[in-house]
Image (cartoon, rainbow, N blue to C red):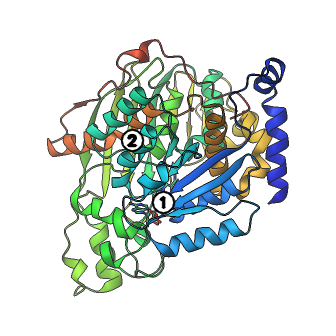
Amino acid sequence: MNSRRNFIKKSAIVGAGISVLPNLTYGFSTKKDKLKVALIGVGLRGTNHLTNLLQREDVVVTAICDVDPVRIKIAEEHIKKHKNPKVQVFGKDDYDYKNLLELKEIDAVIIATPWLWHTRMAVDSMKAGKYTGLEVSAANTLEECWDLVNVHEETGSHLMILENVNYRRDVLAVLNMVKQNVFGEMIHFRCGYQHDLRFVMLNDGKSAYGKGVEFGDKGISEAAWRTQHSVLRNADVYPTHGVGPIAVMCDVNRGNRMVSLTSHATKSRGMHNYIVGNGGENHPNAKVNFKMGDVITSTIETANGETIIVTHDVHLPRPYSLGFRVQGTKGLWEKDGDRIYIEGQSKKPHEWDDSKEWLEKYDHPLWKKYGEHALGAGHGGMDFFVINAFVESAKENIAPPMDAYDAAAWSAITPLSELSIENNGEPQDFPDFTRGNWIKNKPYNWMKGTF
Ligand SMILES: NC(=O)c1ccc[n+]([C@@H]2O[C@H](COP(=O)([O-])OP(=O)(O)OC[C@H]3O[C@@H](n4cnc5c(N)ncnc54)[C@H](O)[C@@H]3O)[C@@H](O)[C@H]2O)c1
């Protein structure tokens, strides 16, 4: 742990040499050496962020907020194990986070609460002048999407959507291939969230991944809040793990934008079958009607003429896969099957190469540099990178790699898919959250090896 702390300190000095040296020379740095960070929501995800923050020399965790005293106790125990000073604690009621936001000393805030709290907390945090990190998905309605953009513009406070999949090793290697034109001109993408979540969305109220078929007041962690979305909404409620990486590959909001979407939903069987299978047909939850279709498929058109198929599939038995496919005029990557084909370069015409060699050849500079240190950070290492990008951007108070406009555009898939499904697949227009600026915005430099 300590070696990771020291490593981050040393490599930040070496890696950030270009930005640090001018500051030393001219002596007017606005870059903070130590970022004072607060966390709102220290459930499973927030605690993961907390653990990664505590391992950094350049962060002081200053305050935490959670309405569940059990989670506060767990967080405090983590904090005690580190050199971090004692934190201020909030959470006496649902709105105590506002008292946390009044603390002048806090520079940055990470929000990892249930979805319905995301936008209002992020808006309050930006209004309080904090550099704000927001878990996925960022917003639930189009109005909330606009709130994120409007408040960012009104206050000048930055918002980063904490989409960790953008930092997955294979995703970044494929992005490297996209940027080096290996696939040619981009044409088509597939992605989604395909994860059997029934053991998370239904539990026994004691253990988050336990047995049991309870949810709402009788469930804990995501069963306490996520499942109700499946009862009441027929929409892709979790689009950003898939669309975040793809949006970066095709420069959404920076030279391109998502223009329209059509969505279709299947019938709903998975949740009911799981409840009957594990709780019996007389369990009260066996009577619950789940409005959300088991498989939701959305097709997005971009201004530059690509299509993106996004799938939401969390109620049926299946192994985990985000189902990526990245296809251009010269070839394609498919995650399912771990295969790549590039015309004229693959070993045989019309036959797949194993993706391994390609992904190693195009390994992203960030992974080359930090990979071994990132691996213990959660979700195969990508959690280290998303927190690293947040902290480094916040220390300089510069626009993050994934900003308020990205948060809005990616999250808009939820309400737009809901509208389309309700209207038999009718196309829905994406609002242009950049107000036309996507035409001149330049892509963020994802290939720099710092963050
Ligand atoms: N990026 C990823 O890989 C990833 C993984 C898991 C979860 N998430 C996201 O993180 C968020 C949290 O998910 P989780 O799994 O940690 O859920 P969780 O239920 O374990 O944690 C949420 C926490 O928020 C607290 N909370 C609720 N209302 C609050 C309020 N008003 N003030 C303060 N605290 C409040 C709860 O008590 C709970 O401890 C969700 O948005 C989820 O989608 C992202």
Quadrant housing residue 291:
bottom left
> Residue 192: image x %, image y %?
43, 46
Say which amino acid is labelled 2: Val
Going by the picture, which residue comes out furthest to the top? 440
> Residue 412: image x %, image y %?
33, 38
Q: Can you say whether 438 is above or below 268 in the image?
A: above
| Contact? badges 1 and 2 (CB < 8 Å) | no
> Residue 368: image x %, image y %?
78, 39
Q: Is residue 173 left or right of residue 64?
A: right
N-term-proximal mark, 1 vs 2: 1
Q: Is mark 1 within 8 Å of ligand 1?
A: yes
Which residue shows up at 33% across the image and 24% down it?
432
> Residue 281: image x %, image y %?
24, 85
Q: Can you say whether 93 is above or below 56 in the image?
A: below
The residue nearer to you, when weighing 411 against 418, is 411
Disc 2 target residue: 123
Say which amino acid is labelled 1: Gly
The C terminus sits in image quarter: top right
Going by the picture, which residue comes out furthest to the left? 423
The N terminus sits in image quarter: bottom right
